[in-house]
Amino acid sequence: MRAANVLMVGLDNEAARRIESILTEAGHTVDREPFRCGFPVCPNADVIFLWGDHRDYRRALAAISAHPDAPPVVLTTRLPDAYGWIDSLEAGVADYCVAPFDRRHVLWTLETALEKINARQSPAESRSREYGIPFPFPAIASDYAGKAT
């Protein structure tokens, strides 16, 4: 799995420390933002871990989902609930991560969310993102511009 930029929004300190420790140990970068109902500030996030135990998490999820370039969201909670899990998946989250935040589960959840990014992109787009090459490969496009085929 490639290194990811993860943004944790509104997680309580204990959960945030536990998940951040797992992710950074695995080579990912982690930023934190306090909970709010608008689109997160961190522009380079590949995945958002959103705190599902906040009373307004549905409003925050709606604000994130409404953004055209929104990264996948993992709803993160200490209160596992089958209905909450189903509701959140129907609302568009990539996955659901519950306490006790086991290392394997956190990393598997992140990988699943990253696969959702790749599923939304063409193979060329996902390769370009993986290798840091701009898409649609401007150098190639300009080399062939105006040439007869």
Image (cartoon, rainbow, N blue to C red):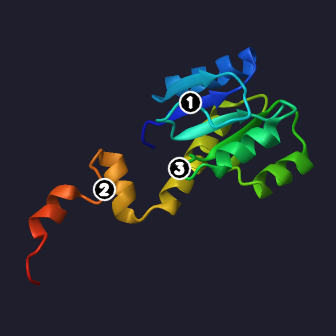
Circle 2 — which element? loop
Q: Which residue is mark 2?
A: 135
Q: Residue at x 83, y 48 (%)?
A: 85
The answer to which image quadrant residue 73 occupies is: top right
Q: Is residue 97 visible?
A: no
Q: Is residue 7 above or below residue 133?
A: above
Q: CA distance from mark 1 to mark 3?
A: 13 Å
Q: Earlier in the sequence, mark 1 or mark 3?
A: 1
Q: Position of residue 96 (x, y in %)?
A: 74, 44
Q: Position of residue 62 (x, y in %)?
A: 74, 47
Name the kind of residue labelled 3 in the image. Asp
The answer to which image quadrant residue 11 occupies is: top right
Q: Position of residue 46 (x, y in %)?
A: 51, 41
Q: Are marks 1 and 2 in contact (CB under 8 Å)?
A: no
Query: Which label sits in the foreground, 1 or 2?
Result: 1
> Quick check: 136 left or right of 14?
left
Circle 1 — which element? loop
Number of callouts? 3
Q: Which residue is mark 1?
A: 41
Name the disc covering residue 66, or none.
none
Q: Which residue is mark 3?
A: 69
Name the kind of residue labelled 2 in the image. Phe
Q: CA distance from mark 1 to mark 2?
A: 24 Å
Q: Classify the position of the C terminus by image quarter.
A: bottom left
Q: Residue at x 87, y 46 (%)?
A: 84
The answer to which image quadrant residue 103 occupies is: top right
> Badge 2, how many Cα within 10 Å: few under 14, some, many 20+?
some
Q: Classify the position of the N terminus by image quarter.
A: top left
Q: Is residue 28 visible?
A: yes
> Badge 3, how many Cα within 10 Å: few under 14, some, many 20+?
few
Name the kind of residue labelled 1 in the image. Val
